[in-house]
Amino acid sequence: MEKTLSIIKPDGVKKNVIGEVIKRFEANDIKIAAMKMVHLTRTQAEGFYAVHKERPFFKSLTEFMSSGPIVVMVLKGNDVIAKNRKLMGATNFKEAEEGTIRKDFATDIEKNVVHGSDAPETAAFEIGYFFNSFEITG
Ligand code: ATP
Ligand code: MG
């Protein structure tokens, strides 16, 4: 079964939509294999988003991602990487489909409530960034 990393970003935690997001995963047959709440340092956020370090929004993104607690989860299911991306909606909430998490809860292209890995290789890196093998069930 496939695994992916999901993050409820600081804006999602502040807006009290942790339950709403998890409810959508569960309603779509996605299992949670690991979960914790952490508050990243700036350096830890920079390490996580290292692929974006040349982008103009890198400074602001890593500042935002270290601005408050986040909920980090390993999701498990058939085709869960694509399935989670579909439930999240487009990066820019203005372009996100109706009924997606970002369409319903995001208010900003940067503060877009959730993160989801975009491929098997990034999922493996991102899961390993937050969890060791003993912390992942199944
Ligand atoms: P994520 O990686 O967080 O799941 P994503 O894969 O949809 O989102 P990426 O292109 O990987 O989008 O960008 C990572 C994050 O950087 C976005 O989720 C968003 O928070 C921020 N971001 C992306 N594009 C912009 C932009 N043009 N302006 C500001 N922030 C941006
Ligand atoms: Mg991405």
Image: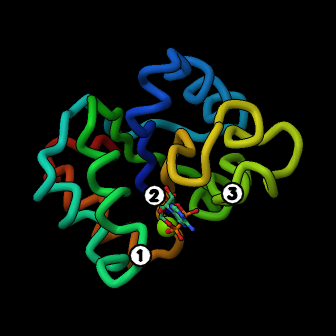
| Residue to which mark 3 is pinned | 92
Cα–Cα gap, marks 1 and 2: 26 Å
Relative to 14, does residue 11 appear above or below in the rendering? Answer: below
The structure residue drawn at horizontal position 64% and vertical position 63%, both measured from the top left corner, is 79
Tell me the quarter of the image containing the C terminus: top left
Residue at the spot 22% in from the left edge and 56% down from the top edge = 45
Judged from the image, the secondary structure of the residue bearing numbered disc 2 is strand
Q: Which of marks 1 and 3 is in front?
A: 1
Which comes before the other along the chain, label 1 or label 2? 2
x and y percentages locating residue 13 in the rendered image? 42, 24
Position of 27 compared to 59: left or right?
Answer: right
Q: What element carries label 3?
A: loop
Front in this rendered view, residue 114 or 74? 114
Estimate the x, y position of residue 107 in percent, counting from the top left. 65, 37
CB under 8 Å between callouts 1 and 2?
no
Give the amino acid type for the residue marked by disc 3 in the picture.
Asn
Residue 50, relative to residue 29: is it above or below?
Answer: below
Q: Residue 4 carries which label?
A: 2
**Ligand 1 has an atom within 8 Å of the beta carbon of the residue at disc 3:** yes
- Residue 56 — which label? 1
Q: Distance between the residues labelled 1 and 3?
A: 16 Å
